[in-house]
Image (tube, grey):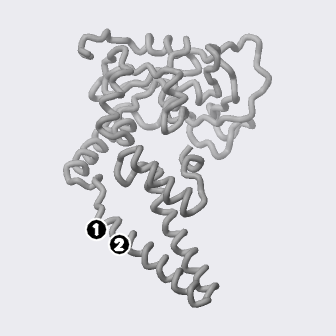
């Protein structure tokens, strides 16, 4: 597909489509429309996407997805946006941060949002919310008859102390660092030097636990086996984050073997 031929959307168009119920995320200058099916199927969960509706998720998407996945991401592109190099994309407030969720084609208020707009001396101020940009979700009140969904006012972000230019500068600095780390190969798994000593430690611990059991030293055997399980948990943690082979199927199968079969812990439950 020729993505360069996609129509350029204005920020107001993006905002209006979000208010109409579309799940739109900005990625590398493109507008991604995320379907409800993918929201339900996303391995990182729906909230990871919903909290970036109306925002530029370029750095986060690049950081948490492998190259083959990044190529598939562009399949959701429906348009382009003009992103100023100096100030970046002017974000919107995701509806979920106001307590709004889209269900069965309608907006539902799941929580009420409290913004600390006034000075700390006011009775309505929340003491531990220092900035006006902070939003606190509390138990929802009875919905007002006039409330049918988020409004343009509610998804318009309040003023922040960090200027858009400063935020864009921080983003550029992060991207430069990310590129240097990638070029140095530091994201690549060191199987022999990294996990080799780990596997050796697990094996030695299991053998010692078995020998202690054979000799009738049950307390020592239980202690050693407990250490093995304890250490295997760290390995299962890495597998759950797809951080060993970086292949979802391989890491999940290894996670099932280590966590489910060896440790009695559901890796699917832990990840999901």
Q: Nearer the viewer, residue 124 or 181?
A: 181
**How far separated are the C-alphas under marks 1 and 2?**
7 Å
Q: Residues within 10 Å of mark 1 (few under 14, many from 20)?
A: few
Specify the quadrant that holds the C terminus.
top right
In this picture, is 270 found above or below 59? below
Asked if the residue at tag 2 contacts the one at tag 1, i.e. Cβ–Cβ closer than 8 Å, the answer is: yes
Q: Which residue is mark 1?
A: 193
**Place of residue 229 in the rendered image (x, y in percent of width and height, measured from the top left):** 54, 69
Which residue appears at 49% of the width and 31% of the height? 49
Query: Which quarter of the rendering shows the N terminus?
Result: top left
Q: As drawn, is 104 to the left or to the right of 89?
A: right
Residue toward you, 177 or 261: 261
Per the rendering, the mark at residue 51 is none
Q: Position of residue 170 (x, y in %)?
A: 33, 41
**To which residue does mark 2 refer?**
197
Q: Position of residue 253 (x, y in %)?
A: 45, 50
Q: Residue at x 62, y 42 (%)?
A: 129
- Name the residue: 28% across, 68% down: 193
- For label 2, the SS is helix
What count of labels does the image hold?
A: 2
Which residue corresponds to the image point at 62% horizontal and 27% vertical from the top-left?
A: 98
Task: Name the side, left or right, on which 65 lies relative to 240.
Answer: left
- The image shows residue 258 at horizontal and vertical percentages of 49, 60
For the residue pair 106 and 162, the one nearer the viewer reads as 106
Depth check, front residue: 187 or 15: 187
Quarter location, residue 151: top right
Judged from this view, the residue extending furthest toward the front is 214
Residue 238, by quadrant, is: bottom left
Quarter of the image where one finds residue 78: top left
Q: Secondary structure at mark 1?
A: helix
Is the residue 258 above or below the residue 130 in the image? below
Please identify the residue farthest to the right as the structure is shown.
142
């Amino acid at each position: 597909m020729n993505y360069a031929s996609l129509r350029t959307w204005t920020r107001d168009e993006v905002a209006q489509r979000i208010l109409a119920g579309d799940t739109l995320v900005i990625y590398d200058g493109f507008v991604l429309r995320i379907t409800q099916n993918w929201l339900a199927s996303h391995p990182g969960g729906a909230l990871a996407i919903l909290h970036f509706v109306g925002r530029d998720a370029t750095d986060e998407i690049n950081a948490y997805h492998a190259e083959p996945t990044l190529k598939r991401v562009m399949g959701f592109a429906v348009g382009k946006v003009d992103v100023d190099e100096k100030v970046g994309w002017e974000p919107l407030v995701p509806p979920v941060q106001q307590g709004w969720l889209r269900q069965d084609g309608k907006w539902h208020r799941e929580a009420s949002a409290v913004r600390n707009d006034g000075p700390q001396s006011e009775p309505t101020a929340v003491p531990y919310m220092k900035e006006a940009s902070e939003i606190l979700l509390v138990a929802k009140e009875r919905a007002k008859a006039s409330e049918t969904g988020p409004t343009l006012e509610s998804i318009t972000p309040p003023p922040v102390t960090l200027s858009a230019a400063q935020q864009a500068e921080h983003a550029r600095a992060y991207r430069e660092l990310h590129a240097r780390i990638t070029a140095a190969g530091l994201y690549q798994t060191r199987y022999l030097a990294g996990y080799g000593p780990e596997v050796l430690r697990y094996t030695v611990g299991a053998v010692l636990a078995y020998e202690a059991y054979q000799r009738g030293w049950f307390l020592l055997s239980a202690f050693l086996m407990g250490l093995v399980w304890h250490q295997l948990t760290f390995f299962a943690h890495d597998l759950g984050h797809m951080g060993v082979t970086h292949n979802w199927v391989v890491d999940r199968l290894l996670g099932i073997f280590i966590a489910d079969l060896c440790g009695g812990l559901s890796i699917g439950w832990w990840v999901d």
